[in-house]
Amino acid sequence: MMNPLLIHVLSPDSACRAKLARLVFDAGSHAEIYADVGELVEARPARGVILLELGKGSFTIENLTAEMNRHGFWLSLVAHTSEPTIREAVKAIKAGALNYIVTPETTTEITELLVELAPQAAAEAAEKIRAAEAISKLSRLSVRERQVLDLLAIGHSNKGIARTLDISPRTVEIHRMKMMGKIGARNAAEAVRIRFEVGDDLPEAA
């Protein structure tokens, strides 16, 4: 049997919030309701999935994800609207939504959504947590240590890094040793993996 999901219903429409919360409860899961992004941010929930209504007020995926990032927490989210379009669906997924759906109207629709969400949300949460941990580790690096790691990640040897940065191979070894110590990498392959988990979301160098 599926473990109950915690659903955070975010909508400026009180009737929509009440209807979706009731459907979630009827489907055997728990719902928390929020009238705006500020209420959600103040609560800073540690788990669950956000069910975000689009098309009303100033609610957008971009401002929601920006606020979560700014306040140091993250949850998967599903966007919904009564009249979805392909164009908006593409935009929603690119902005970070796990899915973009027609607003559920029945317990059956909510149940199907919850069954679909459970494994997706867990996988996405694990990926985001790994990325967040990698970002935290890379934020400890100096500019030069970051440069050494970036060049290592694209296949440069110590000698190649030395030539590119116009420093001695011994200096590269020192920066590399410090870099690996700061990010907790046991070897070069692990350092490169941590770098790739961050992707383009690089933190400021120390």
Image (cartoon, grey):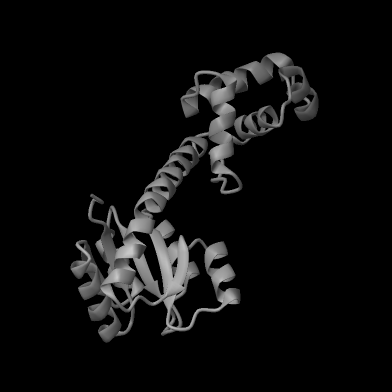
The correct choice, above or below, for 79 with respect to 82 in the image is above
At horizontal 33% and vertical 57% (from top left) the residue drawn is: 115
Q: For this view, does 42 lie left or right of residue 93?
A: left
The correct choice, above or below, for 88 with respect to 143 in the image is below
Observer-nearest residue: 109 or 166? 109
The correct choice, above or below, for 64 with respect to 158 in the image is below
Residue 14 at x, y = what percent? Answer: 26, 84
The correct choice, above or below, for 200 with respect to 184 in the image is below
Residue 60 at x, y = what percent? Answer: 47, 74
Residue 169 at x, y = what percent? Answer: 72, 16
Q: Residue furthest top?
A: 170
Q: Is residue 66 visible?
A: no
Q: Is residue 152 visible?
A: yes
Residue 105 at x, y = what percent? Answer: 32, 79
Observer-nearest residue: 9 or 132? 9
Tag count in the figure?
Answer: 0
At horizontal 29% and vertical 66% (from top left) the residue drawn is: 8
Quarter holding residue 71:
bottom left
At horizontal 26% and vertical 57% (from top left) the residue drawn is: 5
Observer-nearest residue: 186 or 146? 186
Observer-nearest residue: 109 or 72? 109
At horizontal 61% and vertical 34% (from top left) the residue drawn is: 146
